[in-house]
Structure formats: structure tokens, C-alpha cells
Image (cartoon, rainbow, N blue to C red):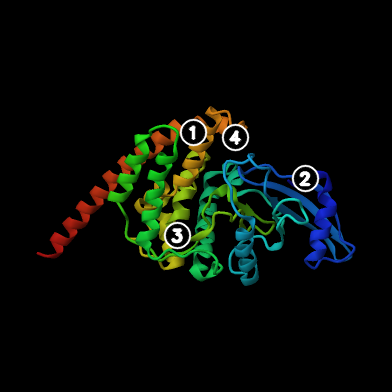
Amino acid sequence: MTDVHALPDRLEDLLRRNGAPADVKVSDVKPIAGGYSLLTFGFTATSAEGTRRHVLRTDPPAGASLTHTDREHEWELLAELTAKGTVPMPAALAYDDGTVLGSPGIVLDFVDGPQLGAHAAASDDAERRRLAGRLAETLAAVHGAGADAAPDGYPRPDSWDDYVDDLIAAWRKVEANHAECNPFLRYVACWLEAHKPPPAPLTLVHGEFQTGNVMIDAQGRMQVIDWEYAHVGDPRFDLGWCQNVAAFAPPDLIGLDPVGFCARYCELTGASPAVVNPLTVGYFSILAGAKAFGALLAGIAAMARGENHLLTTAYLVSAEPFTHRLWMGGTRQLEGAMAALAAQMEAVEQEAGR
């Protein structure tokens, strides 16, 4: 585990190893709240070249997190994206496998501005609609990087069907690994299997895209942070997950005008409206939830066995029934909307054939 009291000296060592001046000094190391998986600290680095704020993302102690991800895997992507400079994100500066810091960590530039979610929650409707437009542009920039933006070590699905089938299978796996029977998970898996949308080209996907993982810098630009779940997949995964999280942490910027948001996204990316629309985004808002919901259930089961004493788990116990209601209602509404759209399209085709 990283020794907080030793962090200034260790960060100075790490920065020097990555090109910082020999006189660099680290001060004002403070924890940054937020997130369930990693420890995050802000700090100031001062040298003859000037003063800059940075962020350290490092692994927590064993057993102190609901999920586990790989810092080296994340660093490979962040270093590549930083070098290319086409994706809106804070520059990645240094990686340590734990040799210097005591646990694996990544140092990035600090974004001097508010979190998008907090800013949107405090804004009026007009500002939220402006932010929704900027959010569409930010998502388009991430997905516009393409599958080749991911390092060679990142797995590529053999096909779109394989990608989606694996995500559906994850729902069944969650129940198989859970401590008790949960037929709701099988219902969701069967529903997803029966209502697959048209395929989309696979590209770089953030994997946990939400307003809490977007910062607004001093120039008003959106910067995407926390790339630990990035992968090559369907871009609608990010749109769907963003709406999923917004159900728990409003406001829902996509939901302000879902048709307009999807139209703007299609305009920016060249995606077909048949592929990206409120119905297909709704489908992915359900499909994308297996990993997070599985971690939630695993944490609750571990708490029941006395193996987990995380306050986060106790807080999330109430999320299980809420999520059941949310996704059950979502599938029913989507199914009705899909049926109405299919009937409308069939009527148009019949009219055209006369």
C-alpha cells in the first residue's frame, strides 16, 4: 500500500525518473474524494520550470475496493492517447508498478475545473442543454479515435455479435456466481438476447462514461478521466452507461432531449440514426450494467459472510431493489416502443408498395 506520509518524496523520485527537473519538489498532497475503486490524490510539483498541479491514481489496499483493475493496462492506453492528442483527457505523465510509490499508480495532469455532474446539477435548464451538446461532442471525439487507438495488448472482439453475446452472457454469469438465486438476472439476459439492435462498428470505448468521469477545465472544455474500464467495443455502451448512472445520479443530460442528442451524435460521427437512437441507447443502458451490478451483488454477499466491511457496500444494498425496478420498467417501455416503431415502419413499407 502507498504510504501517504512518504508520498511527497516518492512522487518527487517518480517525476524525476520521468523527465522532471532535479530540483522538483512535491507539496500539498491531498486526497480527492470520489470513485469506488482507486485512491486519488492531488498534489503540486514545483521546480525551476514552474508550478503545476497533478493527480495520482493508485491502487487501494487489498480488500478495500469493490472492483479490481490493472494500472499497467490503463497506463498503456493513457500513454498512447496522450501521445496522439486526439481524445479530450488530462495528459498522462508517469506510471509506477509499485517500485517507487509502494503500489501501482499513474500520474496525470490536474484538471482545474468542476466535475460535469456537479456543474450540471447546479445549473439551469438552458445550461444543461448546452452541456448536453458538448457531451455529444466529447463522446464523438472519444469514439472517433477508433479501435486502433487501443494498444495492441487490448483484446479485440472477433465480431459485433461476439461482443454483445459476451455481455449478455455476463448477466447469466452474475447469477451463477451469486450467493442466492436471482431470476431477475435471467430475465434480463433473455430479454437482451431477444431484442438485439442493429450492429455498430467497434471502436474505442471508455467503459465507465458518466458525468462524474468528465471534468470541465479552465477553458470550459470537457476532459474525460478514469479510463480503467476502457476497451474495444460498441460505442453505444458509453451512451447507455451514461444514462444508466444518471438514473442514480441525475440530471440525465442525454435524457433532456434524447432524440436531439442522438441526432447530434450521429451528425458528428456519421453513425446511422437506425443504429444510434433513444431505443438502441436504452438497450445498452441495460446491457452495460452486468459488471457493475455483479460487483454490487458480490460485495453484498461478502458482507453477509462477514468478509467485507466496506461502508460503500452497506450504502449500495438499497441499490439492488431500485435497480430491479429500473431495469424491469426499462425493458417493458423499450419493448413497447420497439413494437410501435416496427409497426410504423411496416405501415410505411406497405404504403410505399401500393
Q: Secondary structure at mark 2?
A: strand
Q: CA distance from mark 4 to mark 2?
A: 21 Å
Q: Amino acid at mark 4?
A: Thr
The residue carrying mark 1 is 319
Q: Is residue 19 above or below residue 299?
A: below
The numbered mark, 3 or 4, whose residue comes first in the sequence reads 3
| CA distance for labels 1 and 4 | 11 Å
| Of the pair 310 and 236, the residue shown nearer to us | 310
The residue tagged 3 is: 235
Q: Secondary structure at mark 1?
A: helix
Count neighbours of disc 1 (C-alpha within 10 A) and say few if under 14, some if 14 to 19, many if 20 or more: some
- Give coordinates of residue 113: x percent, y percent: 68, 52
**Quadrant showing the C terminus:** bottom left
| Residue at the spot of label 4 | 312
Identified at 61% across, 31% down, the residue is 309
Calculate the distance from the C-alpha at mark 2 to the C-alpha at mark 1.
30 Å
Label 4 or label 2, whichever comes before in sequence order: 2
Crowdedness near tag 2: few (<14), some (14–19) or many (≥20) residues, C-alpha within 10 Å: some
Q: Which of disc 2 and disc 3 is earlier in sequence?
A: 2
In this picture, residue 51 sits left or right of residue 75: right
Q: Earlier in the sequence, mark 1 or mark 4?
A: 4
Residue 30's disc number: 2
Can you tell which quarter of the image residue 299 is in?
Answer: top right
- Determine which quarter of the picture holds residue 216: bottom right
The residues tagged by marks 3 and 2 sit, at their Cα atoms, a distance apart of 35 Å
Mark 3, Cα crowd under 10 Å, few <14 / some 14-19 / many 20+, is many
Q: Earlier in the sequence, mark 2 or mark 1?
A: 2
